[in-house]
Amino acid sequence: MLRYAVVRGGLGLLAVRRTCLFSRLAHSAPQSNYRPIKKVMVANRGEIAIRVFRACTELGIRTVAVYSEQDTGQMHRQKADEAYLIGKGLPPVAAYLHIPDIIKVAKENKVDAIHPGYGFLSERADFAQACTDAGVMFVGPNPETVRKMGDKVEARTLAISAGVPVVPGTDSPISSLQEAQAFAQTYGFPIIFKAAYGGGGRGMRVVREYEELEENYQRAYSEALTAFGNGALFIEKFIEKPRHIEVQILGDKYGNVIHLYERDCSIQRRHQKVVEIAPAFQLDPHLRDRLHADAVNLARQVGYENAGTVEFLVDKHVADVHVCGWLHVCEGRSLPELGLKQDKIRVNGCAIQCRVTTEDPARGFQPDTGRIEVFRSGEGMGIRLDSASAFPGAVISPHYDSLLVKVIASGKDLHTAASKMSRALAEFRVRGVKTNIPFLQNVFSNHQFLHSTVDTQFIDENQELFNLKPTQNRAQKLLHYLGHVMVNGPTTPIPVKVKPSSTDPVVPPVTMGDPPVGFRDVLLRDGPEGFAKAIRAHQGLLLMDTTFRDAHQSLLATRVRTHDLKKISPFVSHNFSNLFSLENWGGATFDVAMRFLSECPWKRLQELRALIPNVPFQMLLRGANAVGYTNYPDNAVFKFCEVAKENGMDIFRVFDSLNYLPNMLLGMEAAGAAGGVVEAAISYTGDVSDPMRQKYSLDYYVKLADELVKAGTHILCIKDMAGLLKPEASKLLVGALRDRFPDIPIHVHTHDTAGAGVAAMLACADAGADVVDVAVDSMAGMTSQPSMGAIVACTKGTKFDTGIALDKVFDYSEYWEVARGLYAPFDCTATMKSGNADVYENEIPGGQYTNLHFQAHSMGLGNKFKEVKKAYTEANKLLGDLIKVTPSSKIVGDLAQFMVQNNLTRAEVEERADELSFPLSVVEFLQGHIGIPHGGFPEPFRSKVLKSLPRIEGRPGASLPPMDFKSLEEGLRAAHSDEITPEDVMSAAMYPKVFQEFKEFTSNFGPVDCLSTRLFLDGPKIAEEFEVELERGKILHIKALALGDLNKAGQREVFFELNGQLRSVLVKDTVAMKEMKFHPKAQKSIKGQVGAPMPGKVLEVKVKVGSKVEKGQPLCVLSAMKMETVVNSPLAGTVKAVHVTADASLEGDDLILEIEE
């Protein structure tokens, strides 16, 4: 292989490379020189082998393929007339470098000629000689020419004799690092290592500093050895920013040489061409003529007789040469005989070729491997495709080049060809492996590419090319999800083994047109103050519907999905426009949406807002805790309210689980600053009608209301979370507040656990309440809210008439009655058949009552639920008789379960408080993590539990530093390449781990909210056909076909029919995998875990357990697709564990090692 660098008048020769061209004419060469070829073997693989086979078939020549053991499923062996295994037992690349096997197959099967393709043995003189010795034609230069082209001294001599100056470089391959160091000291940096016996970017490394020399020498040598069977390297002075121009040439055995014009190959990554343009765009005509002339002269100078490419680096840059044969020249024909003369060669239009590869541009073009699940190519007029492994089911291994398909577009000019290419790339659908298609699409829309010239630094200097538009891949991800559920069961925990109903609810008819005007129109027109006045002035009782939130939180474990809420929303908008509000967001629904339903809570708010524009929305805000269970910096609470308001929230019902005023005031201020309606909620417990219970007396509630009104609340709310308000207590409390605050609207929230909810709410209305809470009949009662139908019917024709049509309530209820069946695995009625008036004694909030009942049954304590409730009462007394609502109710519940599990009485807990290991929530409460309870902490219980543990004085969040949202957003963008929204930032701020898991879920399965609830929970049955609407006008027709057997990797193949085409996905069987051993994965959330950036083989481990490492220090070297990657340390620290050894094969994200800071 001729390798040299030249500079001549602003341009230089880069390479003469082998290409493949076949044509047949009637002329024949002289019989003495003519040897007809009847059978051709291609000693290569992939698309180059298939291209040669196709050309041979057109010429009536029989074809022979060879393949390695790893390539038994590759397409090139199927495209040939014959195919034979070579290199049995050898590594994947070594098989194609095994000359004895290749020659043996050729001789045994009477092959006339061997075409080497590119790479592998194409530039090995010993291979050309072996072919000659075996009496087989080598489609390429004769062995002596190949030998000379590999002799750097002779190559440089040829260049000089042609009058071409040379760039400094070694005169022969180097054999040691010391020689490289000596060259660098003589000529300075930058320099470039190049493989002596191959090209294509393999074994090439640019070195800019002395410190990089040793590592890059080792990587270049190793890559060259792996790719070409010889690690010999040359060194040259590296020239910056050349324009890479290639000239196509043809030469025969008789000294005839012509050119076929030029192409621009400047767009490269890792010294490999990505895009080629013919002819070169905006190339000076005089320079073009010089390039053509010099290419022909240089070809004559080296005396080559085949079709090939002379590569130039324009603007004083150059490099090396390779040559590939032309079949009929190999047979002995001359160019004139074939009708090829220079004056007959013309340029016609423009052509562009790009390489679609299985590489991830976002990760430095790291190769990706795996199984192609979907392949749909871009085709049409002016598009040609050359591929080999591009088909559904093809396995992309880490052993070979990452090329998937070459796409060639042609048109009348560059812009036309580029438009065709862009269109073709947009039509591609490749699923299962990452590709560089999004990157290529950016190249073909780049202004510099379309309107100016580019050089080899084009990619490096245009970082906007890496602003990749994420592929949606929605259909295939949904199949993955459905397959996962079919193999492993529901992704959300199922408390009761009951199947969802197979009947979907029917939405009642909805009138066409815009919905009627509602109270939200008043709010938008008059603002929060005007809205509050309108509510107070309203004649009749107003209702808030909790069906969309608290009702299903209490009855169905908060599991109702946006899918079912959206379906009924237009009906609600058109028929319940006179509701005070719709409670549909906040509280537990926020994290549960992500945690168990795999939905974005913000998207729910946005979509419901679009469907119900006329009814105010209300959310539950836990004061300084926002929608979380912990303390947040003040600016996080303010920012949350701001974003919620922007997304359509109207009324913020602000409460604190202890009625701790400082926490409430912060939440109120945040809601008010966001422009929302502030509804301060007093959490109710005890019994104001019982003179024996004075801790939470009527005076306590009135004084607390005084403070809330002074703070500027627009509406006062009584939050009776356990349903403790009896009718008499309702009259006393609401009456006192109405007398005290005649102009402030009063809203009462309750639960119907004891069954007295309707009576209590009617008593509240009679005492002066403006609004009471209800749930639609089929979602009411028990631990939910009182029945909407009952309140509407009871007030009809009275001064409290709600103005709601009872028949519409029935239609609404019928929808939810059927919808409730979809959530049968979560329905509290599976274990709880009725409410219970003992709530007046244990004071367990509605939602918690349901959860405790579920937990007791799941733990086999269903018959001991009475004891659990009794323990709850005792635990409440131990903690000082708290107001019980999330999170304080959870603290009481945790202590109660602790007492039941350890068979402890209240007296025993008090006596042994200094030695028991209490639940963390109890300890943190006593430390002051959620605020200070009314009446203070219980002593001496608190002191005995805490001992020397620190105590928080005052508002817990007051001492927290402000949250850095910019830094948080940057971290999210770094972790998740897709677009991060302000809403995502807030989700991560509230629930970092839950949000991370949610993003990982959507990355694997996409948005699953388009699935029906039964399919989401239970998956499809075999042979079931169904439709999924991704968006308006895009509907998937899916049929579940079959479930495969377990394979060695612990996977099952699940088969579907999607839009009439067969699709399959591989799903890990989680139960089976527990019994099988697999390499652990690196957890992104654990800082010191270092994972494999790509699938590949471990070449070298550079550290061991106990090694001290610095940030950026090399840890190990991986090899994939003949490219080597150094894995560097992400942080400074000490190596805690090493999980890999040399020669180990890894998948992406496999754990390499662990580092402790």
Image (cartoon, rainbow, N blue to C red):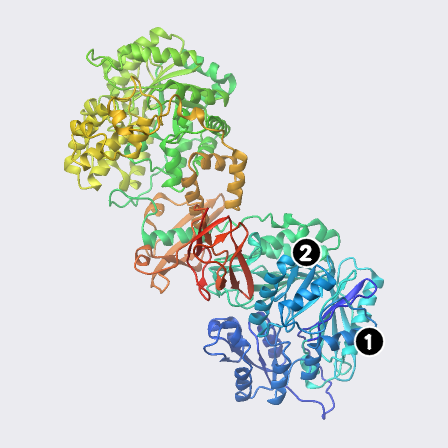
Q: Position of residue 831 (x, y in %)?
A: 20, 37
Reading the image, the residue beneath label 2 is 418
Along the viewing direction, whichever of 24 and 308 lies nearer the viewer: 308
Of marks 1 and 2, the one in the foreground: 1
Residue 184 in the image: above or below residue 491: below
Task: First in sequence, mark 1 or 2: give its number.
Answer: 1
Q: Position of residue 114 (x, y in %)?
A: 60, 82
Residue located 60% across and 53% down the image? 439
Q: Give, as a three-letter code, the residue at label 1.
A: Ser
Residue located 22% across and 41% down the image? 858
The picture quadrant where one finds residue 555 is top left
Q: Give, as a three-letter code, the residue at label 2.
A: Ala
Along the viewing direction, whichever of 310 and 130 lies nearer the viewer: 130
> Label 1: how many residues lie within 10 Å, few (<14), some (14-19) or many (20+)?
few
Q: Quadrant of the N terminus?
A: bottom right
Is residue 616 among what the camera can see? no
Reading the image, the residue beneath label 1 is 161
